[in-house]
Amino acid sequence: MIVRMKKTANKAEINEFLGYIKNKGLSYKDASSSDVILYGIIGDTKAIMESDIYAFSAVENITRVQEPYKLASKKFHPDKTIIDVDGVKIGGDSFVVMAGPCSVENEEQLLTITKDVKAYGASVLRGGAFKPRTSPYAFQGLGIEGLELLKEAKEKYNIPIITEIQSASMIDIFMEYGVDIFQVGARNMQNYDLLKALGKIKKPVMLKRGMDSTIEEWLLAAEYILAGGNPNVMLCERGIRNSDKYTRNCLDIQAVLAIKQLSHLPIIVDPSHSSGRYDMIEDLAKAALAVGADGIIVEVHNKPECALSDGAQSLKPEKFGHMMNELAKIAPIVGKKL
Ligand code: PEP
Ligand code: MN
């Protein structure tokens, strides 16, 4: 971290700041010249908040040379993390496809969709039992009954399941129902109590990017889970807000590259929640594969027009099958297995 002092700062003000640095267990090097008063702060500065430093009257400007996250950073963990979900390896040379309905609605719906997505090559079944809806009047999910149905589908079709957890108090119940990947939704990316609790277990967690979150905030959220002792974290880019109304969100495809540059954690793309449109999913999935994502999570519904949530962004099973065929053509070209 490099800290530039105000030209007008006096000795006492500068010493007050340097005393603070020493108290934090760090050291400093004076790199001042005749034009500028500059200090290089030496040591692990990740626990230092920039806002605390700006509180010193002598400080003009701060430049970080080290990321504030360490466990999520590629610098300290050059090998990619590969998460083994019941034999499905996420983060290696496979492009993993997770698919299923937005919400678990009933037995017939879930089993029909599971059968189809599995037949077309999905390796993880998605389905929300507890739904974080923008409106309190919208369908909130079947709750525990949804978990029961997911367990049934998992056992019947021998496929791991991913579903969203909204509260730390549900962790034991999710374990009981055999949930394989705990999804943290965009709205909960900064629910730090939840993240800390998920750090205490070893189950894989898929952390979706908050709607307006920066890459750094997202990696710091992942850091909470890693710092708690759970190394099995994957990230999911699900689109960020923009002002346009044509699509629901804007798929930040370059975030995939940013994560690959900065972190060793697997990165999944969600073309359903980013676009909000079924007619864009196949092409966005191709983009995700081409750009080097580790997989996608896609909403599929047998009757999208009757879906209790997110029908407009759900593929019909045959369209999902078409997408899988298209992805299979591209995968070898970009060195991935489907
Ligand atoms: C979902 O996966 O159904 C969901 C609610 O996603 P997000 O948190 O990205 O909005
Ligand atoms: Mn959804």
Image: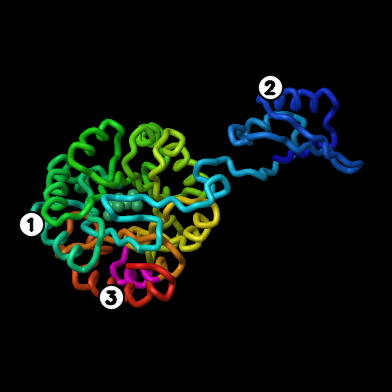
Residue 17 versus residue 6 in the image, above or below: above
Indicate the position of residue 14 as horizontal and vertical percent values.
Answer: 80, 28
The residue type indicated by label 2 comes to Asn
The answer to which quarter of the image holds residue 46 is: top right
Return the residue at label 3.
325
Residue ranking furthest to the right: 34
Return the residue at label 2.
23
Mark 2 Cβ and ligand 1 under 8 Å apart: no
Quadrant hosting ligand 2: bottom left
- What residue is shown at x 48% (from left), y 51% (from top)? 264
Return the residue at label 1.
108
Which secondary structure lies at badge 1?
A: helix
Q: Closest to the observer: 264 or 10?
A: 264
Q: Which mark is residue 262?
A: none
- What residue is shown at x 28% (from left), y 63% (from top)? 313
Which secondary structure lies at badge 3?
A: helix
The answer to which quarter of the image holds residue 12 is: top right
Which comes sooner in the sequence, label 1 or label 2?
Answer: 2
- What residue is shown at x 85% (from left), y 39% (from top)? 32
Residue 187 versus residue 236 in the image, above or below: above
How much space separates mark 3 and mark 1, taking CA atoms? 26 Å
